[in-house]
Each structure stands twice: as structure tokens, then as C-alpha cells.
Amino acid sequence: MARPTPAERFEQNVDRGGPTPLVRDVHGRCWIWTGATNEKGYGTFWADGRTVKAHRYAVELADGQPVPNGLDVDHQCRNRACVRRSHLRAITHRENVLASSNHVARRAAVRACPAGHAYDAANTYRAPNGTRKCRACKREKARAARAAAREQQLATVAPIRTRTTNPERQAA
């Protein structure tokens, strides 16, 4: 009896009757990986002497070539166990992170600061910790701080006291 090929072994771990994704423009049921999974819920598969992610192997198997270096395989259906080729796409890591619903993607989607100033090239700078900051708000805050400092400086000047005369000296 011949040993099964990696493609045949892969196919044995695919359940084609998975759920229908609730994401727009993703059609057809998910093909669920029933084999081993890692701690994050992604399917894993032993092929060519190494462990590979099942969804990445599905893309390579369907396309007949490896996924280019530097690209991630994104689940458009948002189901980590899905290995259906039409639900997967090869994109950059940045695109993959921004396509998700995590806090990084939510913050990147914000187009204006809380005061309503646009986050554009002219009005945005990156803080040392990597976050976006609004130049207009920073300018307004600096102006307010300078005005408060001037007010404080003027308020510390003591009022001029009138000179009082000694009544005994006047009588002499």
C-alpha cells in the first residue's frame, strides 16, 4: 500500500460543511480544518519535514507555488480554522493587521483628533512611542500654557503701598 501524499493527507483533515461566513463579499461555506491546531486556533500540518500553517498550505496547494516571502495569508471570513482558498488572500502584514478588528485597526481608522483636526501629513507627527499626535492641538496647548505663565508672572507683582506718615512726627 502506497503512502498518502501530503495533499491527500491534507484533504483528509478538511470538513467542507462549515459555517457560512457573516462577512460581506465572502461567499460559500468555510472549509474547517479538523486536524491539529495551535494555541491561537490556526490549523497546523506536517508537510515537507516541517510544521506549516494549514491555511498557508491550502493557498500553496491551490496556487501550485509558495506564498511570496513577506506576505501573510489573511482569512477574509475571519474564521481561523478555515482553509477554503476563496476565503484566503495573500497580503502584507500591515494590511492583515489593519483588516482585523483589534485596537490597532480601530485606532488606524480614526481620521481626526478628538478636537476634530484632520490626521493628515501636515497636521500629524509621531510621538516617540509611535502614536499619532495632532500638531494643531499641541500648538493650542502651548499657547495656552504661555498665556497662563504670563498671567502668573503679572499676578506676582505686589501692589504699590501708599506711604503712611507718623502722627507724632507731624505734631513736632
Image (spheres, grey):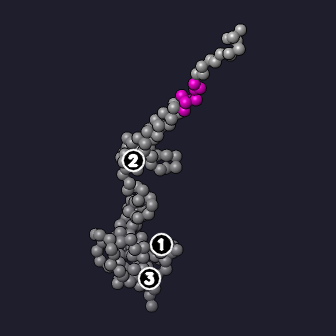
Q: Which residue is mark 2?
A: 115
| Label 1 close to label 2 by CB (< 8 Å) | no
User: Residue 151, image x and y in percent?
Assistant: 51, 32
**Looking at the image, residue 101 lies above or below residue 136:** below
Q: Crowding at label 3, few (<14), some or many (≥20) Cα neighbours within 10 Å?
A: some
What residue is pinned by disc 1? Answer: 52
Residue 101 coordinates in the image, percent (x, y):
41, 64
- The dot on residue 119 is none
Front residue of this view, candidates 26 and 69: 26
Disc nearer the start of the sequence (3/1): 3
Which mark is nearer the camera, 2 or 3?
A: 2
Q: Please report the residue visible at 39 percent of the width from the left and 47 percent of the height from the top.
A: 115
Residue drawn at x 33%, y 74% is 22
- Relative to 4, is 62 on the left or the right? left
Return the residue at label 3: 34
- Taking the magenta stretch, the answer to whether it contains residue 88 is no
Asked whether 157 falls inside the magenta stretch, the response is yes
Residue 1 figure quarter: bottom left
Q: Amino acid at mark 3?
A: Thr
Asked which secondary structure carries label 2, the reply is: loop
Secondary structure found at label 1: strand
How far, Cα to Cα, is label 1 from label 2?
Answer: 47 Å
- Mark 2 residue type: Ala
Residue 57 at least partly seen: no
| Residue 162 horizontal side relative to residue 168, left or right | left
Q: Which residues are magenta?
A: 152-159
Q: What type is the residue that disc 1 sits on?
A: Val
| Mark 3 or 1: the one toward you | 3
For the residues bearing labels 3 and 1, Cβ distance under 8 angstroms: no
